[in-house]
Image (tube, rainbow, N blue to C red):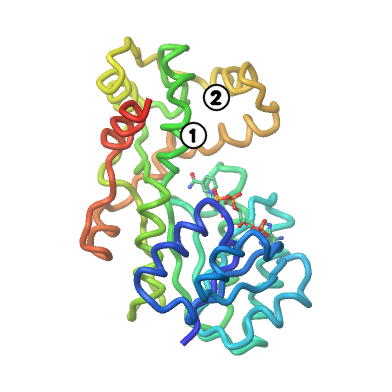
Amino acid sequence: MKIGIVGASGKLGSLVLDHLLELVPAEDIVAMTRSVDKLAAYAERGVDVREADYDKPETLDAAFTGVEKLLIIPSMAMPAECREQFDNAVSAARAAGVKHLLTFTMSGTSPNNPFVMTAALVYAEMALFQSRLAWTIMRNGPYADEFVDWLPSIVEIGTVPYPTGTGKAGYVARDDIARAAAAILEGEGHEGKIHNLVGPEMLTTENLCSLVAEATGEDIIYVPAEPGDYVQVCMDEGVSEESASLLATMYISIAQRLMEVPLGTIERLTGTPPKSVRELLAARVAAG
Ligand SMILES: NC(=O)c1ccc[n+]([C@@H]2O[C@H](COP(=O)([O-])OP(=O)(O)OC[C@H]3O[C@@H](n4cnc5c(N)ncnc54)[C@H](OP(=O)(O)O)[C@@H]3O)[C@@H](O)[C@H]2O)c1
């Protein structure tokens, strides 16, 4: 049985590929990218590397041939483009005889979520539900990696300016999501399931401030932030107003308590709990 991954060259996709290689033989994996050179190291290890571009359906027909389970990692395109990409991928998967489709969306994916990317995420889930193939959805918490990467700025401004009020989210490392996804791809019994892939605890932004203070020994004071405060901080760092405003809507969905989901799935699937934000911060501080 061949397991395919579209988006296997990305930050999340390459981690899924690495974990899957620990579970199944390389020749059972089809890793897909728009530029096969990016995955040359995996081809050398025996992975079947193929070209696949969501925007070029003719590449998908050949890429999906012989694949039984297919992980469609959404591109970072805006919702209108993403919808077309999902239509192309699902049509090609059906034509190629794929049996089981899997994808990643986000905690709290539902039509009432203010996060700008939600239109694409709801569409992706619906595309799988309506595919008439077996499907599995993995709803990820916000990436803890992106929070930890922001550590120098947080220390400089002395707070975490996420406009989340008292809402909580299950910040989760990409590596833990990938570990769980590999277990799902390799395992059985995940058809028709929605898995919440989140960190080991639900955290408020006030909790995040305390954790950064503990990890760094700096004064990190929680100051309730409005979306405009967050956008201004991002723009001061050179992020465009458009991107910062889009990201702010994700934190508004946390403020509306839409990302508070049950814990424990990653440990149940893999036998190992996901890393906490405390552990990830400590590792980053230790790395210097
Ligand atoms: N939970 C969160 O906090 C959070 C935050 C950010 C993103 N995300 C989601 O996480 C997912 C992956 O993120 P990431 O960090 O791994 O992103 P990334 O490193 O930018 O990877 C994106 C991947 O998409 C592929 N891709 C882009 N356009 C494509 C197209 N037209 N056809 C086929 N493949 C295409 C790229 O492959 P090639 O360039 O090799 O073709 C690449 O492998 C995305 O679905 C994103 O929406 C979640």
- The foreground one among 42 and 223 is 42
- The foreground one among 157 and 232 is 157
Q: Position of residue 145 (x, y in %)?
A: 43, 39
Q: Position of residue 266 (x, y in %)?
A: 29, 58
Residue 251 is marked as: 1
* Element on which disc 2 rests: helix
- Judge the density around disc 2: few (<14), some (14-19), many (≥20) Cα neighbours within 10 Å: some
Q: Earlier in the sequence, mark 2 or mark 1?
A: 2
Name which residue lies at 33% across and 21% down: 209
Tally the marks. Answer: 2
* Element on which disc 1 rests: helix
Q: In which quadrant of the rendered view does residue 6 lie?
A: bottom right
Q: In which quadrant of the rendered view does residue 81 lie?
A: bottom right
Q: In which quadrant of the rendered view does residue 259 lie?
A: top left
Q: Position of residue 195 (x, y in %)?
A: 37, 63
Placement of 6 over or under 97, stated as above or below:
above
Name which residue lies at 55% across and 17% down: 229
**142 left or right, relative to 87:** left
